[in-house]
Amino acid sequence: MPQKVATIQDVARLSGVSTATVSRTLSHPERVAETTREAVLRAVRDTGYVANSMARNLRRRRTGSILALVPNLANPFFSEILSGLASVLTPAGYGLLIADTHTDPAGRLAHYLESGLADGVVIFDGSLPLEALATRRRPPVILACEWMGEALPSVRVDNAAGAEIAIRHLHEMGHRRIGHVMGPAGNVLTESRLEGVRRARGDLGLPLRDDWIFRGDFGLASGSAAAMTWLGLKDRPTAVFCASDEMACGFMGALQHAGIAVPADVSVVGFDDIEVVAHLTPALTTIRQPRRLIGRRAAELLSAMIDTRTLTGPSELLPVELIRRQSVAPPCGTGASP
Amino acid sequence: MPQKVATIQDVARLSGVSTATVSRTLSHPERVAETTREAVLRAVRDTGYVANSMARNLRRRRTGSILALVPNLANPFFSEILSGLASVLTPAGYGLLIADTHTDPAGRLAHYLESGLADGVVIFDGSLPLEALATRRRPPVILACEWMGEALPSVRVDNAAGAEIAIRHLHEMGHRRIGHVMGPAGNVLTESRLEGVRRARGDLGLPLRDDWIFRGDFGLASGSAAAMTWLGLKDRPTAVFCASDEMACGFMGALQHAGIAVPADVSVVGFDDIEVVAHLTPALTTIRQPRRLIGRRAAELLSAMIDTRTLTGPSELLPVELIRRQSVAPPCGTGASP
DNA sequence: AGTGAATCTGCAAACGATTACATCAACGAC
DNA sequence: GTCGTTGATGTAATCGTTTGCAGATTCACT
């Protein structure tokens, strides 16, 4: 049923020139005489010819696509970054290939890199065995959000600074007893945000209580779980900074369902500023990451690396911003500090 | 710097066989003598050979990837479906190519189909000019969530039924004055859910007031906007069914920020059951779509179409389910019906 | 020993583009 | 009139696989 699709040969035959000329007409129009060009273009139109990308890419020794490795596609945090990626990649003629590294059997990183099915790779998953990248010789790789020493270029925000801003904001609002819901263990984001928390607490002379540090994994459920832990505490922090908005949602939700009022009983700050948190009640105060911009810059830097055939390139640190909303208030009955 | 990557020739040379045998060893191991196979596999390991997918696909006349056209990557609703897609596509040896049809210049549908860079296409965006698909001759296409008559196969839920369930639930809880926040005009989902609302209202003998039908576009902001309209009404419905969870979030959020209590003052039902709504306060009662399953089935049906070289195939209607949570209560001060 | 089948392997032709190089015509300068 | 230059086109090699066909070997059976 599917009839033959036109090849460059068909166009050449129909317009009475060689395939070389057809190819040139399409990729370097200026190198072809105007009358020829017109004839060729007409033939292209008539046959409905569109170049076979496999053949083209084989010859050009490229793939025309960029691979994005995300830990969890279902997480809204990534989708907007991807959207930013796509917005520069598509115009640049690249396709966006997406792989969910958690759906996938683990340890496939090497496979993806070697497979040669992408001209470049954007990695969002810091839990991948990134050391393997050091010895790779081919596709340029850039990290987004995550990072790994100075070895690999990355586009990200200053996470420690973001965390510090969050803590300082709570401090300014009068809080002295501040808890933190962490991300998954071993993650650079987790470490870095925790580091920011510790630093700010230290600088501000706040108590460094480890029972106010709750384990999490950036997901909604772990936020709820942290809330349960908080509820079980006899000596509770009056404010909690969650290392992700998702966890903040889970945390606030579980607290409220248990009859605790936010921010009256406890203040909450998130991280990321995903779209929905502005619509929560109370709207969540959070540290915004410029996600679409992260996507765009990652795409731009990566595509520069591809063009210059370099395996490495500059990194970029993007600014975070405190978004004040309604989930933070002075602690319980106080207007000022003790 | 980037040294040569091993080709099938290198492997052939190293293992002392022809390229044909190497190829066979890799794709049809059973057709090769055991000793040869071992020698070849050793050479593969030693050279680190991995087949060039461009060459392979060129020869096989396929691309090895599936294209997903989503209206808006940043919408969490889609990400989980994509995740489901990926979970069957990856093991099946396909890559998942994703294009955001709103980021992209419009009218590119034809371009995507003709471009021949995918063996199959999953369309999530019903607002695309789908009529064009009728005349296409090549890549099999399946619609997900959306649909279009019987012409194209699709995987979706019974949207009208879902809406009806929502309305009937509100009715059972004692509501008689029920509003609806619609999706974007012209969308089949919008129409179908609206149709369900109308049918249920009719069957139950509820008032068919058009000023209780609010325009929306499935997004958060339009939910908030609908809330503003609701606030401005002098004669308000006691319950509102939103055609998407995102709109329900926006709606509830804006209402609560304006001092209206949900569900005490107004009950809200959503549609989709995206993850976050279980963590809202009140947790949102909603109609669940089995999103991961939608993704999986779409992938399975599409890949069957590809295997059988058919341009069409069966559709599938998946079940919806009412998830009762806390955003619905009997209307204002009533325990029973008037 | 001869025959046929079964099994394994290699040769070489695709797949459909791009592009280095060669060719050829036209032109102006000397 | 010769030579060098410029511009437009064609020839054919190349990218790295897969696979139809045929040759070679082995084996079983008569």
Image: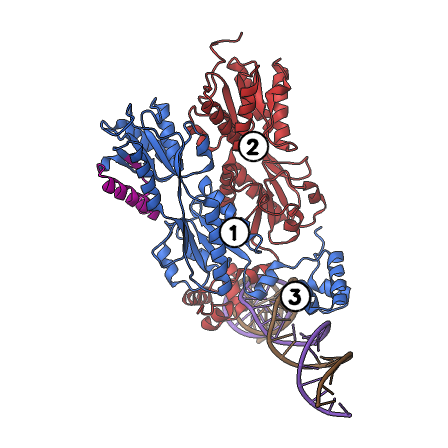
Chain colours: A blue, B red, C brown, D purple
Q: Position of residue A31 (x, y in %)?
A: 68, 69
Q: On the rendered structure, is B164 left or right of A250?
A: right
Q: Which residue is mark 2?
A: B218
Q: Residue type at mark 1?
A: Leu
Residue B285 makes an appearance in the image: no
> Which residue is identified by label 1?
A97
Q: Are marks 3 and 1 in contact (CB under 8 Å)?
A: no
Q: CA distance from mark 2 to mark 1?
A: 26 Å
Q: What are the residue bounds of the magenta stretch?
A: A179-208
Q: Amino acid at mark 2?
A: Phe
For residue B281, which quarter of the picture? top left
Q: Are marks 3 and 1 on the same chain?
A: yes
x and y, in percent, of residue B276 in the image: 44, 32
Which quarter of the image is occupied by the C terminus of chain A?
top left
Position above or below: C23 against A305:
below
Q: Quadrant of residue B219?
A: top right
Pointer 2 and pointer 3 on the same chain: no
Q: Position of residue B127 (x, y in %)?
A: 64, 38
Question: Mark 3 and mark 1: span between their CA atoms?
Answer: 28 Å
